[in-house]
Image (cartoon, grey):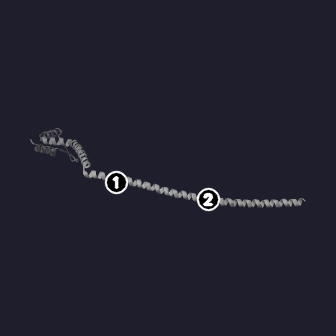
C-alpha cells in the first residue's frame, strides 16, 4: 500500500464511524487508527524524516549560522580598520588634525596672555582709582575734623567766656 491509499482508508474510518449525537464528533477504533498512522509513517520516504530533522534542528542551525556570520563580520571590520589606518587619506587627516591641534594650542596661549594683560591693566586702573579715592576720603576726613575741632574750639571758648563772665559777676557781688 502506498501512503495515499492509507490516508484514504483513514478518511473512510472517520466517515463511517459512529456519530455522537449533537456534538459533531465520531467514535473511532483507537487501535485501528493508530495502526494506520504507523503504516503511513513507515511508508513515508526518508526525505520526510530528514525534513523533520532539519525542522527540529533549524534553531540550532540558524544560531550557528548567525555566530559564523558575526565572526566573519568582526574579521571584515578588523581588516577594514587596518586598511583605513594604512590609507593615505587617513594619514593625511591625522597630520591635519595634529596641525590643527598645534594651532589651537598656540591660539589658546595667546588668548591666555591677552587675558592676563587685560586683567593686569584693569587691576592697575583699579589700584590708581583706589589710591585717588583714598586720598579724597582722607582729605574730606581732614576737612571735617578741622571743621569739627574748630566748632569744638568755638564752643569751648564761648563756654570759657561765659564762665569768666559768671566769675566776674560773682566777684562783684561778693564785694
Q: Point out residue 65 in the picture as x, y percentages from the top left corner.
A: 21, 44
User: Marks 1 and 2, Cα distance to the nearest angstrom?
Assistant: 54 Å
Q: Residue at x 68, y 60 (%)?
A: 146
Kindly identify which numbered label has been placed on residue 92. none
Looking at the rendering, which quadrant does residue 67 occupy?
top left
- Depth check: give the residue in front, 121 or 62: 121
In which quadrant of the rendered image does the C terminus lie?
bottom right
Percent position (x, y) of residue 7? Answer: 13, 44
Can you give x and y, in whole percent of width and height, for residue 150 in the image?
Answer: 71, 61
Residue found 55% across the figure and 59% down from its top: 129
Judge left or right: residue 173 versus residue 44. right
Residue 121 falls left or right of residue 141:
left
Quarter-of-image position of residue 61: top left
What residue is shown with label 1?
A: 100
Q: Nearer the viewer, residue 62 or 56?
A: 62
Dot 1 or dot 2: first in sequence order is 1
**Of residues 175 and 90, which is closer to you in this image?**
175
Q: Classify mark 1: residues with Cα within 10 Å, few (<14), some (14-19) or many (20+).
A: few
The residue shown at (49%, 55%) is: 120
Residue occupying the far right of the picture:
175
Task: Please name the residue that numbered disc 2 is placed on.
Answer: 137
Q: Position of residue 71 (x, y in %)?
A: 24, 43
Drawn side of residue 96 relative to residue 147, left or right: left
Viewport quadrant of the N terminus: top left
In the image: residue 28, left or right of residue 90: left
Amino acid at each position: 500500500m502506498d501512503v495515499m491509499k492509507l490516508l484514504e482508508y483513514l478518511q473512510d474510518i472517520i466517515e463511517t464511524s459512529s456519530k455522537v449525537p449533537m456534538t459533531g464528533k465520531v467514535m473511532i477504533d483507537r487501535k485501528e487508527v493508530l495502526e494506520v498512522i504507523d503504516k503511513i509513517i513507515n511508508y513515508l520516504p526518508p526525505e520526510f524524516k530528514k525534513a523533520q530533522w532539519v525542522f527540529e534542528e533549524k534553531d540550532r542551525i540558524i544560531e550557528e549560522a548567525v555566530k559564523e556570520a558575526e565572526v566573519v563580520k568582526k574579521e571584515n571590520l578588523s581588516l577594514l580598520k587596518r586598511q583605513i589606518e594604512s590609507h593615505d587619506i587617513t594619514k593625511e587627516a591625522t597630520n591635519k588634525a595634529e596641525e590643527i591641534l598645534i594651532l589651537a594650542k598656540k591660539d589658546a596661549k595667546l588668548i591666555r596672555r591677552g587675558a592676563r594683560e587685560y586683567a593686569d591693566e584693569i587691576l592697575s586702573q583699579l589700584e590708581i582709582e583706589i589710591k585717588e579715592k583714598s586720598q579724597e576720603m582722607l582729605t574730606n576726613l581732614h576737612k571735617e575734623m578741622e571743621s569739627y575741632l574748630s566748632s569744638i574750639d568755638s564752643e569751648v571758648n564761648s563756654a570759657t567766656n561765659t564762665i569768666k563772665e559768671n566769675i566776674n559777676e560773682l566777684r562783684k557781688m561778693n564785694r
